[in-house]
């Protein structure tokens, strides 16, 4: 109630984030059992890659299609990715799928502790997986220099492991698509203080995004991230949530903002407003 959400933003957000991936791992597995499975996958992914990018809710479909290989189904994802690559050795999409599966193993090996609290053996295991993943991403980009998803995989590995790789891949990703929601999302994550960034860095990413919302309406979602980051990690921040994030939540459909604002009203005893 009382929101000023732009209909185009709501539509794009729902289409981009709520539309299921075009394939499941099991479907790809079954396709690859057939004689024409690899060719069918190549055609489908090439169609997604070449689709017009003027509809914000339907752009970057390859990212969503390959994200199924990085959803914590480690053994299955790696097995199917290797099966796909064995069936189509020149497929940049299969290389990226394997890169995603290996990178997912790397993040799992690292764990969620702060880097200073992470045992060396975990970091070594992470590095092994990240190195293998990066090799696949680089091979994929050699095959298809415009394959954004492979470039994005390098950005994420760089955030954790290499400033040089992060800078290289960020520049490359922005050259491929300067208004990619997922690239800007990764840039915003890297700009957060927990990853060595700062409030100023987050504001810089938000300003970059806001200057380009006419080309991708989804970039509106980054407008208040710097405020959300501080409030979400602070203590006794209900007043800030109501003063800063409630107006923001009325401007952009961000679940994180709504969670913090609703929680603040709940703790005030205003149950009806918290539900709305």
Image (cartoon, grey):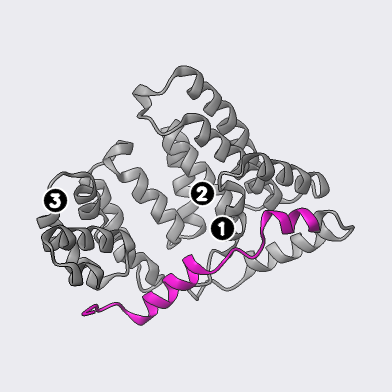
Q: Compared with residue 4, is residue 205 higher up or lower down, i.e. above or below?
A: above
**Which quadrant of the rendered structure holds the N terminus?**
bottom left
Q: Which residue bears the numbered disc 2?
A: 152
Any part of residue 56 in sight? no
Magenta residue span: 1-30
- Relative to 172, does residue 254 appear above or below in the rendering? below
Q: Tell which circle, 1 or 3, labels the residue nearer the N-terminal end.
A: 1
Residue under pointer 3: 237
Task: Tell me where residue 212 sits by quadrant.
Answer: bottom left
Give me the C-alpha separation between circle 2 and circle 3.
Answer: 33 Å
* Magenta-colored segment: predominant secondary structure: helix
Badge 1: how crowded within 10 Å, few (<14), some, or many (20+)? some
Q: Quadrant of residue 5?
A: bottom left
Q: Residue at x 46, y 37 (%)?
A: 158
Residue 109 shows in the view:
yes
Q: How many marks?
A: 3
In three-dimensional space, the C-alpha distance between marks 1 and 2, rounded to whole angstroms, equals 9 Å
Mark 3 surroundings: few (<14), some (14-19) or many (≥20) residues within 10 A: some
Q: Is residue 147 left or right of residue 15?
A: right
For mark 1, give the secondary structure. helix
Let me know if residue 234 is in the magenta part. Answer: no
Q: Secondary structure at mark 2?
A: helix
Residue that label 1 marks: 63
Res 270 label: none
Tell me the SS state at disc 3: loop
| On-image quarter of the C terminus | bottom left
Q: Which sits earlier in the primary sequence, circle 1 or circle 2?
A: 1
Give coordinates of residue 246: x percent, y percent: 18, 66
Give the label, 2 or 3, closer to the camera: 3
């Amino acid at each position: 109630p009382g929101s000023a959400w732009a209909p185009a933003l709501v539509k794009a957000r729902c289409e981009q984030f709520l539309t299921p991936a075009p394939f499941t791992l099991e479907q790809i597995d079954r396709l690859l059992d057939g004689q024409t499975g690899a060719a069918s996958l190549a055609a489908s992914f090439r169609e997604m890659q070449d689709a017009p990018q003027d509809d914000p809710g339907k752009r970057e479909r390859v990212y969503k299609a390959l994200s199924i290989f990085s959803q914590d189904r480690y053994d299955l994802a790696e097995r199917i990715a290797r099966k796909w690559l064995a069936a189509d050795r020149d497929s940049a999409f299969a290389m990226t799928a394997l890169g995603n599966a290996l990178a997912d193993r790397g993040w799992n090996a690292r764990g969620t502790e702060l880097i200073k609290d992470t045992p060396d053996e975990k970091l070594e295991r992470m590095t092994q997986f990240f190195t293998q993943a990066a090799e696949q991403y680089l091979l994929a980009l050699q095959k298809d220099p415009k394959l954004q998803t492979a470039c994005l995989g390098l950005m994420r590995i760089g955030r954790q492991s290499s400033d040089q790789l992060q800078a290289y891949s960020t520049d490359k990703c922005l050259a491929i698509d300067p208004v990619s929601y997922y690239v800007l999302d990764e840039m915003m994550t890297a700009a957060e203080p927990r990853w060595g960034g700062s409030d100023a860095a987050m504001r810089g990413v938000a300003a970059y995004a806001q200057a380009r919302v006419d080309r991708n309406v989804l970039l509106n979602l980054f407008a208040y991230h710097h405020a959300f980051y501080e409030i979400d990690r602070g203590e006794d921040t209900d007043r800030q949530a109501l003063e800063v994030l409630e107006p923001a939540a009325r401007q952009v459909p961000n679940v994180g903002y709504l969670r913090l604002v609703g929680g603040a009203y709940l703790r005030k005893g205003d149950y009806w407003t918290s539900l709305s």
